[in-house]
Image: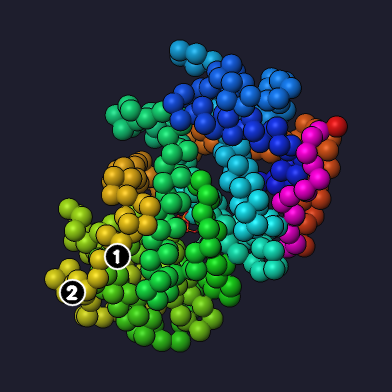
């Protein structure tokens, strides 16, 4: 797991971002974007695209690779993160970057701050985070995959999560309040004084919480949706034992071909957890037949910019992708090979000095400002 050194953001000039964005645009139809294409898209007034690219390589925002057919540049995770953060900062959605609070199986979560000093949660989706070994085992699955697909799927996942959070929040479901979304990055309400259920040892009334969770699964289904990952990691519990549900990229409609299987699995997850953790068992639990469709949030979501086609593509990726959880053997080759972008620049003296500041700031749980409006060109 790498840290994101946002201080580097402050040193990036307009030209740097222009070139970084050009690499991103080139990746829509090139696995590796040739230097000449980057330069053509960027069309810098005074030229010098190569020099900027060298700088971006130094900060590990892009890498240069030799491909089967051609050589060229591609964005790293960090490069993509910076593009999203820069956009959210210029929309004045976030102004400060704090510490990391969670590493999910397919994301990194940070605390950020907005202009009024309010704390928010920022989720960076990382859908390509599968190790190399699994990738080798799943050649078939990867046959039509390009190195750029992690960009695409991570962006789809964030877009889907944002769309679902909006409709669910709008209907009064206990989910974080959505704020904004750009690329693979989602900004939402930070749930304070909450713990993931997996960390909760004791609740005042397990039966009451169990009933609430079962009712939530049914209420979701009555509105047309199945969470598909309704477990102790995706349920946050407040100090008053109230649950909030998170993590929606894998949600499906109750008309999905395997809806019943996923519904039953969500129910089973909760039953097993309550037995294991609280020694609580109940004969009563909902079944698929209990669903009483009263709303069509599944259709409403596709009206909000996240289409059915995008959804089936994303679900194919999520529900069939090799999971990290199956991977207990210590085949360390590799997360780095796939995940090269997580390292931060250390080779420039400015950057390492700032890294120290960044780490110190993190310790104090303070926020690093994201933008320095005066930086327009490097001196
Ligand atoms: P993943 O898809 O990678 O599992 P999640 O959305 O489940 O990501 O988030 C991972 C962890 O981050 C959660 O288990 C929780 O601890 C924390 N987290 C996520 N969203 C929030 C939030 N809005 N407020 C507080 N903590 C959060
Ligand atoms: Mg999760």
The residue at which mark 2 appears reads as 292
Residue furthest left as drawn: 289
Considering the image in quadrants, where does the C terminus appear? top right
Whole-Å distance between the Cαs marked 1 and 2? 13 Å
Callout 1: CB less than 8 Å from ligand 1? no
Whole-percent x and y of residue 166? Answer: 42, 64
Which residue is at the front of the view, 286 or 37?
Answer: 37
Residue 343, how many percent across, how many down? 65, 38
Point out residue 263 in the picture as x, y percentages from the top left corner: 24, 63
- Tag count: 2
Q: Secondary structure at mark 2?
A: loop
Q: Of the numbered discs in the image, which one, if any, rests on residue 217?
A: none
> Which segment did they paint magenta?
365-378
Residue count near mark 1 (Cα–Cα under 10 Å), binned few <14, some 14–19, many ≥20: many
Which dot, 1 or 2, sits closer to the camera? 1
Q: Earlier in the sequence, mark 1 or mark 2?
A: 2
Q: Can residue 128 be seen at all in this image of the molecule? A: yes
Q: Is residue 328 on the magenta stretch?
A: no
The kind of secondary structure the magenta stretch mainly shows is loop
Residue at the spot of label 1: 297
Rendered residue at 63%/43% (across/down): 82
Q: Residue at x 57, y 29 (%)?
A: 23
């Amino acid at each position: 797991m790498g840290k994101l050194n946002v201080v580097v953001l402050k040193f990036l000039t307009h030209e740097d971002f222009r070139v970084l964005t050009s690499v991103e645009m080139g990746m829509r139809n090139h696995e590796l974007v040739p230097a000449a294409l980057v330069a053509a898209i960027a069309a810098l007034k005074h030229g010098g695209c190569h020099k900027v690219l060298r700088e971006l390589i130094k900060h590990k925002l892009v890498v240069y690779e030799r491909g089967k057919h051609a050589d060229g540049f591609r964005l790293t995770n960090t490069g993509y993160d910076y593009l999203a953060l820069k956009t959210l900062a210029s929309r004045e959605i976030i102004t400060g970057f704090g510490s990391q609070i969670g590493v999910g199986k397919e994301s990194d979560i940070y605390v950020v701050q907005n202009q009024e000093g309010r704390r928010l949660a920022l989720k960076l989706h990382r859908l390509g985070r599968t190790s190399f070994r699994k990738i080798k085992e799943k050649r078939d699955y990867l046959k039509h995959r390009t190195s750029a697909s992690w960009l695409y799927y991570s962006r789809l996942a964030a877009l889907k999560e944002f769309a679902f959070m909006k409709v669910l929040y709008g209907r009064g479901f206990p989910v974080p309040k959505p704020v904004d979304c750009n690329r693979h990055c989602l900004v939402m309400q930070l749930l304070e004084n909450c713990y993931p259920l997996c960390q909760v040892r004791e609740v005042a009334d397990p039966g009451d919480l169990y009933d609430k969770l079962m009712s939530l699964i049914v209420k979701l289904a009555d509105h047309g949706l199945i969470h598909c990952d309704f477990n102790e990691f995706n349920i946050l519990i407040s100090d008053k034992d109230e649950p909030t549900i998170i993590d929606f990229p894998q949600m499906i409609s109750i008309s999905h071909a395997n809806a019943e299987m996923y519904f039953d699995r969500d129910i089973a997850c909760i039953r097993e957890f309550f037995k294991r953790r609280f020694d609580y068992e109940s004969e009563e639990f909902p079944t698929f037949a209990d669903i009483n469709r009263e709303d069509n949030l599944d259709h409403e979501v596709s009206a909000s910019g996240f289409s059915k086609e995008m959804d089936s593509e994303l679900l194919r990726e999520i529900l069939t992708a090799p999971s990290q959880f199956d991977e207990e053997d210590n085949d360390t080759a590799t997360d780095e090979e796939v995940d090269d972008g997580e390292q931060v620049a250390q080779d420039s003296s400015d950057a390492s000095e700032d890294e120290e500041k960044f780490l110190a700031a993190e310790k104090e749980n303070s926020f690093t400002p994201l933008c320095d409006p005066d930086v327009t060109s490097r001196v």
